[in-house]
Image (tube, coloured by chain):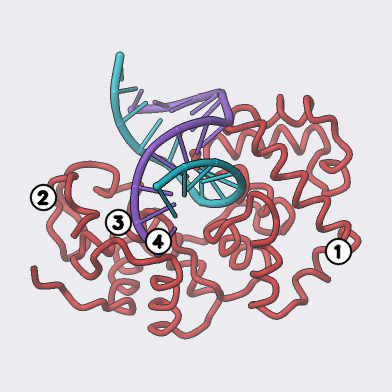
Chain colours: A red, B cyan, C purple
Amino acid sequence: MNRTPLDLIGLHEALLQAYGPQDWWPGREDPFEVIVGAILTQRTTWTNVASVIEALRSAELLTFEAIRMAEDRRLEDLIRPTGFFRAKTIKLKAFCSLLRADYDGDLSRLFALPLAELRTWLLSVHGIGDETADAILVYAAGKASFVIDAYTRRLLTRLGSIAGNESYQWLQDAFAEALPADVSLFAEYHALIVHHAKTHCLSRPRCDGCPLAYSCDFAKQGEESG
DNA sequence: AACCAGGAATGTA
DNA sequence: TACATTCATGGT
């Protein structure tokens, strides 16, 4: 099948035209809160995470020291609505413990690292993989590291621009080469992709009035295998 | 009532 | 490297 060219600049323009600026990630003022949210939102809806964040705030558990010292059971009960609550308790504590061990709990010292080293450090934390690391880099640390998620892959696949089985690195490199390394741009672009996915057809078999120039009439099966 | 949600770790071949 | 399994609640 012939593929439409991978025009990542044009795609951003189309999304921005359709939806406008997103000003994403509520609570971005507090980097630590963003990190907690990034871990909790793994494979879960943001609405569940948002309520849990408020519960943690009320419990005064939105600092690395408080989470590090908290009883597992207490933390588990508070974050239960986000699912995988035992695993996520371990993940949150792993981050807080390593942050204290390596940087005395000082996020600004951690964020002072060059992008590549900071990303490597994040990936060394149990529970932080590629996507969570990049979300933290963009929305908490202010570094231009493009977030690739399932929506991004699905959208480009449906546009017919990629096969769908490309590696995370390959996709991230494609964005990095096509776009200027601008944090705000990366933050907005990823937000637009997620917004498009949630309001249109990336989570449905088809939809009407899709603002993007591709047909929403497709079969769910076979889309990922090119 | 199956199916999915702003993934990652672990184990197997 | 590539694929399967586990983790688990809440909304549709």
What residue sits right under mark 2 in the picture? Answer: A217
Q: Residues at badges 3 and 4 in contact (C-beta under 8 Å)?
A: no
What residue sits right under mark 3 in the picture? Answer: A154
What residue sits right under mark 1 in the picture? Answer: A102
Which label number is shown at residue A192? 4
Please give left or right for residue A33 compared with residue A152 in the image: right
Where residue A162 appears, as percent x and y from the top left, is 25, 68
What residue is shown at x 24% (from left), y 61% (from top)? A157
What chain is tagged by disc 1? A
Q: Nearer the viewer, mark 1 or mark 3?
A: 1
* Label 1 crowd (10 A; few <14 / some 14-19 / many >=20): few
Q: Earlier in the sequence, mark 2 or mark 1?
A: 1
Helix, strand, or loop for circle 3?
helix
Q: Residues at badges 3 and 2 in contact (C-beta under 8 Å)?
A: no
What chain is tagged by disc 2? A
- How far apart marks 1 and 4 lie (CA) works out to 35 Å
Q: Residues at badges 1 and 3 in contact (C-beta under 8 Å)?
A: no
Q: Earlier in the sequence, mark 3 or mark 2?
A: 3
What chain is tagged by disc 4? A
